[in-house]
Image (cartoon, grey):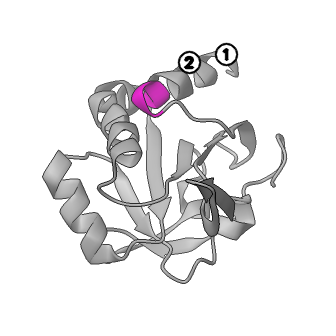
Protein backbone atom coordinates (compact mmCIF):
# COMPACT_ATOMS: atom_id res chain seq x y z
CA UNK A 1 0.00 0.00 0.00
CA UNK A 2 1.27 3.50 -0.71
CA UNK A 3 2.63 5.08 2.46
CA UNK A 4 1.85 8.40 4.11
CA UNK A 5 4.14 11.06 2.65
CA UNK A 6 4.61 9.24 -0.67
CA UNK A 7 3.23 10.43 -3.97
CA UNK A 8 -0.02 8.68 -4.81
CA UNK A 9 0.30 6.30 -7.76
CA UNK A 10 -0.76 8.16 -10.89
CA UNK A 11 -3.52 6.84 -13.13
CA UNK A 12 -5.88 7.75 -15.95
CA UNK A 13 -9.46 6.45 -15.86
CA UNK A 14 -12.75 7.40 -17.54
CA UNK A 15 -15.56 9.03 -15.59
CA UNK A 16 -19.30 8.39 -15.87
CA UNK A 17 -19.40 10.42 -19.12
CA UNK A 18 -16.42 8.64 -20.69
CA UNK A 19 -14.05 11.59 -20.12
CA UNK A 20 -10.56 10.58 -18.94
CA UNK A 21 -9.14 11.96 -15.70
CA UNK A 22 -5.43 11.77 -14.86
CA UNK A 23 -4.67 12.09 -11.16
CA UNK A 24 -1.50 14.16 -11.64
CA UNK A 25 -3.55 16.78 -13.54
CA UNK A 26 -5.09 17.71 -10.18
CA UNK A 27 -1.80 18.77 -8.55
CA UNK A 28 -2.28 22.09 -6.81
CA UNK A 29 -5.53 20.85 -5.32
CA UNK A 30 -6.41 18.49 -2.47
CA UNK A 31 -7.89 15.22 -3.71
CA UNK A 32 -9.86 12.38 -2.13
CA UNK A 33 -9.60 8.99 -3.84
CA UNK A 34 -12.01 6.46 -2.43
CA UNK A 35 -12.42 2.87 -3.55
CA UNK A 36 -15.79 1.17 -3.20
CA UNK A 37 -17.01 -2.32 -4.13
CA UNK A 38 -20.06 -1.80 -6.36
CA UNK A 39 -22.51 0.80 -7.64
CA UNK A 40 -25.99 0.86 -6.13
CA UNK A 41 -25.33 -1.46 -3.18
CA UNK A 42 -26.29 -0.47 0.39
CA UNK A 43 -22.89 0.46 1.85
CA UNK A 44 -21.73 2.10 -1.37
CA UNK A 45 -24.93 4.16 -1.58
CA UNK A 46 -24.38 5.42 1.98
CA UNK A 47 -20.76 6.29 1.31
CA UNK A 48 -21.42 8.04 -2.01
CA UNK A 49 -24.37 9.96 -0.58
CA UNK A 50 -22.27 11.13 2.38
CA UNK A 51 -19.92 12.80 -0.14
CA UNK A 52 -22.93 14.21 -2.02
CA UNK A 53 -24.39 15.64 1.17
CA UNK A 54 -21.08 17.33 2.04
CA UNK A 55 -20.37 18.59 -1.49
CA UNK A 56 -20.69 22.27 -0.52
CA UNK A 57 -18.02 21.79 2.15
CA UNK A 58 -15.73 20.03 -0.32
CA UNK A 59 -16.22 22.75 -2.91
CA UNK A 60 -15.52 25.52 -0.40
CA UNK A 61 -12.26 23.74 0.55
CA UNK A 62 -11.41 23.16 -3.16
CA UNK A 63 -11.16 19.39 -2.63
CA UNK A 64 -11.74 17.12 -5.64
CA UNK A 65 -13.44 13.77 -4.87
CA UNK A 66 -13.03 10.64 -6.98
CA UNK A 67 -14.90 7.39 -6.30
CA UNK A 68 -13.42 4.33 -8.01
CA UNK A 69 -14.89 0.88 -8.60
CA UNK A 70 -14.68 -1.83 -11.26
CA UNK A 71 -18.14 -0.89 -12.58
CA UNK A 72 -18.29 0.44 -16.13
CA UNK A 73 -19.06 3.97 -17.32
CA UNK A 74 -22.76 3.23 -17.92
CA UNK A 75 -23.20 1.77 -14.44
CA UNK A 76 -21.55 4.87 -12.94
CA UNK A 77 -23.76 7.15 -15.02
CA UNK A 78 -26.94 5.43 -13.74
CA UNK A 79 -25.67 5.36 -10.13
CA UNK A 80 -24.76 9.04 -10.21
CA UNK A 81 -28.11 10.05 -11.72
CA UNK A 82 -30.20 7.86 -9.42
CA UNK A 83 -28.74 9.40 -6.24
CA UNK A 84 -27.88 12.88 -7.50
CA UNK A 85 -24.19 12.36 -6.80
CA UNK A 86 -22.05 15.45 -7.27
CA UNK A 87 -18.55 13.94 -7.35
CA UNK A 88 -16.72 12.12 -10.11
CA UNK A 89 -16.97 8.33 -10.42
CA UNK A 90 -14.13 6.57 -12.22
CA UNK A 91 -14.35 3.19 -13.96
CA UNK A 92 -11.44 0.81 -13.29
CA UNK A 93 -12.96 -1.98 -15.39
CA UNK A 94 -9.58 -3.59 -16.12
CA UNK A 95 -8.71 -3.51 -12.39
CA UNK A 96 -5.42 -1.71 -13.02
CA UNK A 97 -5.67 1.07 -10.42
CA UNK A 98 -7.24 -0.67 -7.41
CA UNK A 99 -4.21 -2.98 -6.90
CA UNK A 100 -1.83 0.03 -6.99
CA UNK A 101 -3.56 1.28 -3.84
CA UNK A 102 -3.87 -2.17 -2.24
CA UNK A 103 -7.62 -1.77 -2.67
CA UNK A 104 -8.23 -5.17 -4.22
CA UNK A 105 -7.93 -8.45 -2.40
CA UNK A 106 -9.56 -11.28 -0.51
CA UNK A 107 -12.91 -10.55 1.10
CA UNK A 108 -15.19 -12.77 3.19
CA UNK A 109 -18.96 -12.86 3.25
CA UNK A 110 -21.19 -15.57 4.71
CA UNK A 111 -18.16 -17.82 5.15
CA UNK A 112 -17.18 -17.52 1.50
CA UNK A 113 -13.91 -16.00 0.31
CA UNK A 114 -13.68 -14.09 -2.95
CA UNK A 115 -11.63 -11.37 -4.64
CA UNK A 116 -12.99 -7.84 -4.81
CA UNK A 117 -12.49 -4.18 -4.13
CA UNK A 118 -11.60 -3.31 -0.55
CA UNK A 119 -13.21 -0.15 0.78
CA UNK A 120 -10.32 2.32 1.25
CA UNK A 121 -9.83 6.07 1.04
CA UNK A 122 -6.73 8.17 0.44
CA UNK A 123 -6.35 11.87 1.12
CA UNK A 124 -3.84 13.71 -1.06
CA UNK A 125 -2.32 17.11 -0.52
CA UNK A 126 -1.76 19.73 -3.22
CA UNK A 127 1.52 18.07 -4.23
CA UNK A 128 -0.15 14.70 -4.79
CA UNK A 129 1.28 13.14 -1.63
CA UNK A 130 -0.77 10.91 0.63
CA UNK A 131 -1.54 12.62 3.94
CA UNK A 132 -3.93 10.02 5.34
CA UNK A 133 -5.32 6.62 4.45
CA UNK A 134 -8.52 5.04 5.75
CA UNK A 135 -8.51 1.25 5.77
CA UNK A 136 -11.71 1.05 7.81
CA UNK A 137 -14.55 3.19 6.51
CA UNK A 138 -17.77 4.12 8.29
CA UNK A 139 -19.96 4.52 5.20
CA UNK A 140 -22.68 6.67 6.80
CA UNK A 141 -20.33 9.45 7.92
CA UNK A 142 -17.25 8.96 5.80
CA UNK A 143 -17.31 12.36 4.09
CA UNK A 144 -17.31 14.08 7.48
CA UNK A 145 -14.41 11.89 8.68
CA UNK A 146 -12.42 12.86 5.62
CA UNK A 147 -13.04 16.59 6.07
CA UNK A 148 -12.03 16.31 9.71
CA UNK A 149 -8.84 14.49 8.72
CA UNK A 150 -7.95 17.26 6.27
CA UNK A 151 -8.41 19.89 8.96
CA UNK A 152 -6.20 17.88 11.32
CA UNK A 153 -3.50 17.33 8.68
CA UNK A 154 -3.37 20.93 7.41
Magenta stretch containing residue 65, yes or no?
Answer: no
Q: Which element carries disc 2, helix, strand or loop? A: helix
Where is residue 67? Give x, y as percent. 45, 54
Dividing the image into 4 quarters, which one contains the C terminus? top right
Find residue 108 and name its label. Answer: none
Q: Is residue 82 left or right of residue 23?
A: left
Dominant secondary-structure state across the stretch colored magenta: helix
Can residue 104 be seen from the camera position used here?
Answer: no
Find residue 152 and name its label. Answer: 1
The residue at the point 54 percent across, 43 percent down is 32
Dividing the image into 4 quarters, which one contains the N terminus? bottom right
Which segment did they paint magenta?
139-143
Which residue is label 2 attached to?
Answer: 148
**In terms of depth relative to the viewer, which is nearer, 98 or 11?**
98
Magenta stretch containing residue 142, yes or no?
Answer: yes
Q: Is residue 93 left or right of residue 154?
A: left
Image quarter for residue 99?
bottom right
Few, some or many residues within 10 Å of mark 2 (<14, 14–19, 20+) = few
Where is residue 101? Give x, y as percent. 71, 59
Image quarter for residue 55?
top left
**In terms of depth relative to the viewer, which is nearer, 131 or 83?**
83
Few, some or many residues within 10 Å of mark 1 (<14, 14–19, 20+) = few
Q: CA distance from mark 1 to mark 2?
A: 6 Å
Q: Mark 1–mark 2 contact, CB under 8 Å?
A: yes
Where is residue 147? Give x, y as percent. 51, 24
The residue at the point 47 percent across, 64 percent down is 69
Q: Is residue 8 above or below residue 61?
A: below
Q: Which element carries disc 1, helix, strand or loop? A: helix
Can residue 101 be seen from the camera position used here?
Answer: yes
Amino acid sequence: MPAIGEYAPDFTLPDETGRDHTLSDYRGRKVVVYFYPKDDTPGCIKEACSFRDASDDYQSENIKVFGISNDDVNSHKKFKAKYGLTHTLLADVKNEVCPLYDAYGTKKMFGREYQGILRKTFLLDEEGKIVKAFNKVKTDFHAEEVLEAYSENG
